[in-house]
Image (spheres, rainbow, N blue to C red):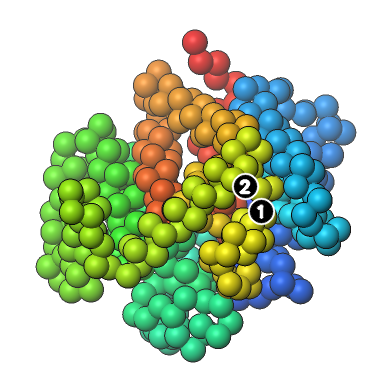
Amino acid sequence: MKRKYSHYFSVPTLGIFITLIIALIGELYRLKGLLLLDIWTPIFTGSWLLWKYKQGKIPTASKLHLAAIMFAALAFISLLVNSGEMSKGEFIAAAMYGIRWTSLILLAFLIMDENPEIKKIIQLELLIFSCMLAIAGFIQLTIMPDFSQFEILGWDPHQGRLLSTWFDPNFVGAYLAFSLPVFMGIAWDSKKYPALWLLILGLMALALLLTLSRSAYLAGIVGMGIFALIRSRKLFIFLIIATLLSLTILSPVRERSISLVQSIIDSTSESYFLPDPSARLRFNSWEEAWRLFLDKPLLGQGYNRYAEAALKLGSLKDTKIHSANGSDSSLLTILATTGVLGFLPFISLYAMILRKAWWTWSHHNKSSALGLFTGITGLFIHSIFVNSLLFPLLLAPFWISVGSVLPDKVKIR
């Protein structure tokens, strides 16, 4: 009994609990402009890695590790190549963002190497975090539905949308859209407390709807829809009924859903026309990123130098706004900042995770792995429209989820 409860107070579980608490704090507090997550994660993962080393438990290198190392190395090389256009302070700041990305992905690799008992506790911590993020969003929507007063600080003037502690409905929606199929899979595997799981998943789904994020809606439809199609016809029918009910009851959700369909139709029609202002801005952002990529296609403008490069290009007037550090597409942002050489290992990393998740599902019948596969698929769709694959507050629970679901010792033939 004593050994069982010791797992709850181990280095991994305590460290991940603190990491998720800091991710939940989100944008509520910054230390000299830095997210608390930027400070904590490198310290925690470095200490955890050292602790493993002293115990002789360093994870065995794999193709996943190699892809991550290659991307991190090429991101740093892209900075060195462009260092002539940067001050010493700008170079150090950009390099620190590279350290942040590396420390975040280390969370996945370190958790992946842990035993199943530790992983189950971490999944419980993720579940609590997700519920708290949703509840914080409900509180924010009740006491501060109008965020336009913070536009002067660089935030978008959202009104009547669930922002939670991340102050952005698209990123909150992206995480919820990703995590819902993951937790559906975990619930399916556990076969316990179905009523409680239904309540929790319903809470998260409602929070997703109230973000009024069209890109998150699309990610959720893809992730949960594919999961249900593969796993259960009854679940698929239930999701259709629940969607129709939400469209009937919640008029803002209905309006945003109609707008999503109309934007898709307009963007694919022969007479290219986008009446929606946010959709027009998104297309302009894609064009800007493509121009930056074509300017330096091999190694890009330098990792995390998107704002400075766009300012030099003349397409950006103020680097201090929160949307300045990337295109409205993670893949285009990676292309623009690290070029083709950085893009290839970045994509390979996610492709290998998807392959491993699908193999785990198909060979071991793990619904949580299927949920991870479909959740990442939906998140990739989302990343076409929003820079979600580089947003740190989302990446922390994302990589924790990847590590807690994927087995480390499974070899794919």
Q: Amino acid at mark 1?
A: Asn
The local secondary structure at tag 1 comes to loop
Q: Residues within 10 Å of mark 1 (few under 14, many from 20)?
A: many
- Are discs 2 and 1 less than 8 Å apart at CB? yes
Q: Quadrant of residue 25?
A: bottom right
Q: Residue at x 71, y 23 (%)?
A: 60
Mark 2, other Cα within 10 Å: few <14 / some 14–19 / many ≥20: many
Residue 103 picture location, percent across and down: 71, 46
**Residue, disc 2:** 337
Q: Earlier in the sequence, mark 2 or mark 1?
A: 1
Instruction: Tell me if 43 is positioned left or right of 317 in this view.
Output: right
Q: CA distance from mark 2 to mark 1?
A: 7 Å
Residue 61's disc number: none
**Where's residue 113, x and y in %?**
65, 31
Q: Which amino acid type is marked by label 2?
A: Thr
Residue at 30% across, 52% down: 218
